[in-house]
């Protein structure tokens, strides 16, 4: 026995001695996927003369991920720089003329992470944020001189996210939030300061969903206040800084369309231990541009006691914004049902407006039958108001006249918000006299342009339509054509006959093109190379199949380069995520395009193609609840039936080896993996990544709260 044990120890120690040590590098093909830069982002100047191409890196580096991080009130904050942790940026900027195609690289960018690039309203400047280990600072590139310079030495506070800066309407400078303290003034927690944690501040019961990274102690609250306290500032292009108002936990700041007022919101104490900062008490005010208080608009309490339900809201003035087609008019919604959508009410919301100088009482603009979702402004005689309801997933939109809101509204759309086939698209917008994007209305004030993904049984087919409210008819002006997937990004002339598009195919990286719809011509604008040349030749197919209960399903099949079905079955990795529906027809809809570029990301399942696997991506796993049934009532049965249908279609095609199929998913997809491995014999292995398994934490609904 001793001799056997000795042999075992020798073998074991020998095995350990020969094991590789140190950092283990993956195969080069995999490493290249992580390092491959993403397709550049783009932003267009207001005069439609220039495009700024913003070059983006691949995955963040270890040094970046190792930066300090405080998890407070639902946020992740880098306390050293008063900014969100793990933010992404650009590695370079290149300007290209939409008129001549001229390329102008911005060659004097400072060292650091560049982010949030934005053209000035007069299109003469391109401002951006620079993140360094010292903090966030504001920089500007002047197109006329081709030079870059720091605007001001003060650091910006972006802990509460939102806009890091906003251009003034006259392009003379910016509004922003500046840090109020330095990082070395951070409050320290002493053992003598430890106090009992009180998890209620109102004495009322609160049924709320679970949230991550909440405040846990009084010290957390002090630290949160320290990191989020800022000063609103007016900074000129020449670097002159004017501090406005007092220090506060400012969440948002927006100038009125005429530039005469500021709408400012700030968080207040007492903080909550039950909900994130998005539901903390919120004070909203109107200031002059000198920082003087004009009027208080709203003072909302903590949102702890908002009734349960996705479409329940806080009582009081909410969704406060400027009306885009007026000089200085506020718009907001107020619940008429106590915030509880399940309560009986003729109108669940009302919409109000309030005109500057805010001396007269606000006026009721509209009564909303369901829950207010928003208004898209056109002009005094044209706007679109939308409402929704969670119980049946319904969304509705009407055209109405803001100048005469009592006149009959015209129904524009009514559908399930999950119903992609009947989505009319998004309104094309144009700048008005205030430089604000509003709906582009023409004809006898009754015609608009719409662009969208164009979901259909054949896959997504992006389009541009002209819709006539006078005749309730539409005319298709353009749509994408196979074998390409081409989306309209934005118009680049007044009548929207010239548009900037993003065009791609299965093996062609998305690139920007200029399309002349009127003359049916196409000009390539960028030439981005394939990011992963080793994966050129992947075969992609959108597969249609059916579940046993008659629900139509789809999934996207990817086959390794060089594979032919005559070679016989190969191992398959399925990557899926279950979703809830209230309608079988909607659950059966196709949500992808067979012509989209195959972007192989380290985050998803496609790298396994390099190991000889086929990948069945996003095979639909709909969980349907109709009538009084909730989706969770038959979760396990429907999940297994969907998986059986997916396996059967691949095996019947001769692609999948039934003894070598794995299932994978992330978060709720990981919960799916656990259930399929436990309640079926379809899969030989599973990958459950970052799983959410405790369903007792979500007792009020399927998947979410």
Image: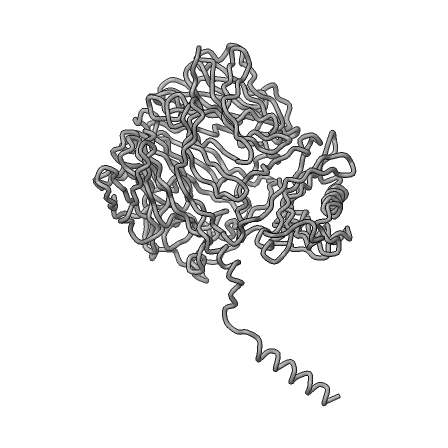
Question: Is residue 167 visible to the viewer in this orientation of the structure?
Answer: no
Q: Nearer the viewer, residue 203 or 226?
A: 226
Question: Is residue 215 visible to the viewer in this orientation of the structure?
Answer: yes
Residue farthest to the bottom, as pictured: 3
Residue 121 x, y percent position in the rendering: 31, 31
Q: Is residue 110 left or right of residue 677?
A: left
Q: Is residue 269 left or right of residue 630?
A: left
- At horizontal 72% and vertical 38% (from top left) the residue drawn is 545
Q: Looking at the rendering, in which quadrant would you find the N terminus? A: bottom right
Quarter of the rendering containing residue 359: top left
Q: Looking at the rendering, in which quadrant would you find the C terminus? A: top right
Residue 52 x, y percent position in the rendering: 35, 39
Residue 428 x, y percent position in the rendering: 45, 25
Q: Nearer the viewer, residue 562 or 176?
A: 562
Q: Is residue 170 left or right of residue 157?
A: left
Does 562 appear above or below 414?
below
Residue 305 x, y percent position in the rendering: 57, 37
Quarter of the rendering containing residue 158: top left
Q: Nearer the viewer, residue 664 or 508?
A: 508
Identify the colour scheme used.
Answer: one colour
């Amino acid at each position: 026995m001793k001799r056997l044990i000795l042999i075992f120890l020798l073998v074991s120690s020998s095995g350990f001695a020969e094991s590789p040590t140190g950092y283990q590098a993956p195969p080069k093909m995999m490493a290249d996927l992580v390092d491959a830069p993403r397709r550049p982002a783009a932003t267009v100047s207001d005069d439609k003369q220039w495009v700024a191409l913003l070059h983006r890196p691949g995955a963040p580096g270890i040094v970046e991920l190792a930066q300090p991080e405080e998890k407070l009130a639902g946020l992740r904050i880098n306390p050293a720089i008063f900014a969100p942790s793990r933010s992404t940026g650009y590695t370079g900027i290149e300007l290209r003329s939409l008129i001549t195609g001229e390329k102008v690289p911005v060659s004097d960018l400072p060292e650091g992470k560049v982010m949030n690039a934005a053209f000035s309203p007069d299109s003469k400047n391109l401002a951006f944020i620079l993140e360094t280990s010292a903090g966030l600072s504001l920089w500007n590139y002047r197109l006329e001189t081709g030079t870059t310079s720091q605007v001001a030495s003060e650091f910006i506070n972006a802990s509460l996210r939102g806009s890091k800066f906003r251009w003034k309407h006259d392009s003379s400078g910016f509004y922003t939030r500046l840090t109020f303290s330095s990082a070395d003034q951070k409050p320290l927690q002493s053992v003598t300061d430890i106090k009992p944690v009180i998890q209620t501040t109102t004495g009322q019961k609160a049924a709320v969903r679970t949230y991550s990274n909440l405040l846990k102690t009084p010290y957390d609250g002090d630290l949160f206040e320290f990191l989020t306290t800022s000063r609103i500032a007016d900074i000129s292009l020449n670097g002159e800084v004017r501090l406005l108002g007092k220090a506060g936990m400012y969440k948002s700041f927006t100038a009125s369309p005429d530039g005469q007022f500021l709408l400012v919101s700030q968080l207040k104490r007492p903080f909550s231990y039950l909900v994130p900062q998005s539901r903390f008490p919120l004070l909203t005010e109107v200031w002059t541009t000198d920082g003087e208080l004009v009027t208080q608009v709203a003072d909302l309490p903590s949102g702890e006691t908002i009734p349960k339900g996705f479409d329940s809201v806080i009582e009081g003035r909410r969704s406060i914004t400027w009306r885009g087609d007026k000089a200085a008019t506020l718009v907001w919604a107020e619940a008429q049902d106590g915030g509880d959508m399940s309560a009986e009410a003729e109108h669940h919301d009302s919409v109000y407006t309030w005109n500057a100088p805010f001396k007269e009482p606000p006026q009721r603009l509209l009564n909303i039958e369901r829950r207010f979702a928003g208004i898209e402004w056109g002009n005094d005689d044209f706007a679109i108001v939308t409402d929704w309801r969670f119980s049946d997933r319904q969304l509705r939109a009407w055209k109405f006249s803001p100048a005469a809101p009592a006149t009959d509204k015209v129904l524009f759309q009514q559908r399930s918000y999950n119903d992609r086939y009947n989505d009319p698209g998004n309104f094309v917008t144009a700048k008005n006299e205030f430089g604000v994007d509003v709906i582009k209305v023409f004809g006898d004030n009754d015609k608009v342009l719409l662009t969208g993904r164009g979901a259909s049984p054949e896959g997504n087919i992006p389009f541009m339509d002209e819709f006539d409210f006078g005749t309730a008819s539409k005319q298709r002006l353009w749509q994408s054509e196979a074998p390409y997937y081409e989306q309209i990004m934005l118009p680049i002339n007044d009548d929207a006959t010239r548009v900037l598009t993003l065009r791609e195919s299965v093996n062609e990286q998305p690139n920007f093109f200029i399309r002349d719809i009127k003359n049916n011509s196409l000009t390539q604008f960028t030439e981005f190379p394939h990011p992963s040349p080793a994966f050129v030749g992947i075969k992609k197919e959108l597969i249609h199949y059916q579940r046993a209960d008659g629900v139509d399903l789809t999934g996207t099949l990817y086959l390794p380069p060089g594979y032919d079905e005559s070679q016989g079955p190969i191992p398959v990795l399925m990557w899926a995520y279950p979703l809830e529906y209230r309608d079988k027809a909607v659950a059966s809809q196709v949500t992808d395009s067979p012509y989209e570029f195959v972007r192989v990301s380290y985050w998803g399942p496609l790298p396994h193609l390099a190991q000889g696997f086929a990948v069945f991506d996003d095979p639909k796993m709909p969980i349907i609840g109709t009538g009084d049934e909730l989706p969770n009532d038959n979760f396990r049965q429907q999940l297994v039936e969907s998986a059986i249908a997916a396996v059967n279609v691949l095996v019947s095609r001769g692609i999948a080896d039934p003894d070598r199929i794995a299932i994978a998913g992330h978060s709720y997809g990981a919960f799916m993996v656990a259930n399929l491995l436990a309640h079926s014999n379809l899969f030989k292995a599973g990958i459950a990544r970052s799983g959410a398994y405790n369903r007792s934490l979500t007792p009020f609904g399927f998947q979410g709260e």
